[in-house]
């Protein structure tokens, strides 16, 4: 009899202990949904022109958002769905901190009519105003570059540094994928295909410096092999290596 009573007492203690554990766990989970974890400290970082209120609206977060249960990757995807945003990184700092880092997608060219801004990755960012001075991406007939060639044309414009970009009027993509850069100086430079764009851009910058130093007029240039560029001069149409 005493053994049975002892067993019942032990069972009762374990039952109470188990109930207490479940109760504490339930209360703990419930606490994560309280105002303690509301995002009262939201910090936006990064250089971009998008207003704070618009960023928060795109992210679907506000000062009542629950930091504990926030899925940062979902918020990042929402933000990166806006073409003005190249990259978003969202982190939380319990109990009430939310950090949003934004990297802006910078325009490198314009395309179409009316003109639209384009990033170096070929993503159309939005309308361009009349003051924008960036290369236009076009087809050989002067119309806008096709969707299939947009990424290559944009990457070409993106390879140019800001100073060099201002010296370029248009980037033309031919049907076979060839690239031609037409400059404000009045001549065109052939880039060949879309390989080694950074090297070809550097070669173009060297060519422009060479033209200024020699005070010559160039009719056309071939930068297909960036290590061995040539220019066709107006006087005598002589091919000249650029060094």
Image (cartoon, rainbow, N blue to C red):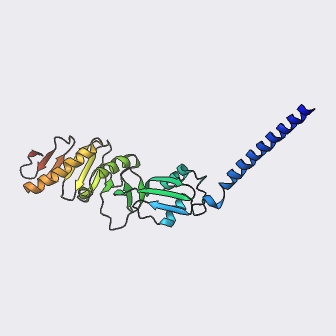
Measured as percent of width and height from the top left, residue 94 is found at 56, 55
Q: Is residue 193 above or below residue 62?
A: above
Q: Quadrant of the C terminus?
A: top left
Quadrant (top left/top right/bottom left/bottom right) for the N terminus: top right
List the single residue furthest toward the left: 236
Q: Is residue 193 left or right of residue 12?
A: left
**Residue 140 shows up from this direction:** no
Q: Nearer the viewer, residue 196 or 25?
A: 25
Residue that extends furthest to the front in the rendered view of this protein: 2
Taking the image as shown, residue 180 lies to the left or right of residue 93, namely: left
In-image side of 120 versus 240 (left or right): right
Q: Residue furthest right?
A: 1
Of residues 23 and 17, which is closer to you in this image? 17
Image position of 66 with respect to 73: above or below = below
Residue 187 x %, y %:
18, 54
Is any part of residue 49 visible from this angle? yes
Q: Residue at x 40, y 56 (%)?
A: 105
Residue at image x 76%, y 47%? Answer: 20
Instruction: Judge left or right: residue 153 versus residue 182.
Output: right
């Amino acid at each position: 009899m005493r053994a049975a009573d002892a067993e019942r007492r032990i069972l009762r203690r374990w039952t109470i202990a188990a109930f207490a554990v479940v109760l504490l766990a339930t209360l703990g989970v419930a606490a994560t949904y309280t105002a303690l974890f509301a995002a009262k400290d939201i910090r936006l970082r990064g250089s971009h022109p998008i207003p704070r209120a618009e960023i928060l609206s795109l992210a679907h977060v506000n000062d009542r958002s629950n930091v504990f249960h926030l899925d940062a990757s979902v918020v990042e995807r929402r933000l990166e769905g806006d073409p003005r945003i190249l990259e978003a990184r969202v982190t939380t700092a319990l109990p009430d901190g939310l950090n949003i880092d934004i990297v802006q997608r910078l325009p490198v060219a314009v395309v179409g009519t009316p003109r639209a801004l384009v990033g170096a990755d070929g993503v159309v960012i939005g309308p361009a105003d009349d003051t924008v001075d960036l290369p236009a991406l076009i087809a050989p007939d002067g119309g806008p570059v096709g969707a299939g060639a947009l990424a290559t044309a944009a990457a070409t414009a993106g390879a140019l540094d800001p100073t060099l970009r201002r010296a370029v009027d248009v980037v033309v993509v031919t049907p076979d994928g060839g690239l031609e850069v037409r400059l404000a100086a009045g001549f065109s430079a052939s880039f060949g295909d879309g390989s080694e764009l950074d090297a070809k851009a550097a070669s173009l910058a060297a060519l422009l410096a060479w033209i200024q130093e020699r005070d010559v007029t160039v009719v056309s240039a071939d930068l297909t092999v960036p290590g061995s560029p040539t220019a066709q001069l107006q006087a005598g149409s002589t091919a000249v290596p650029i060094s």
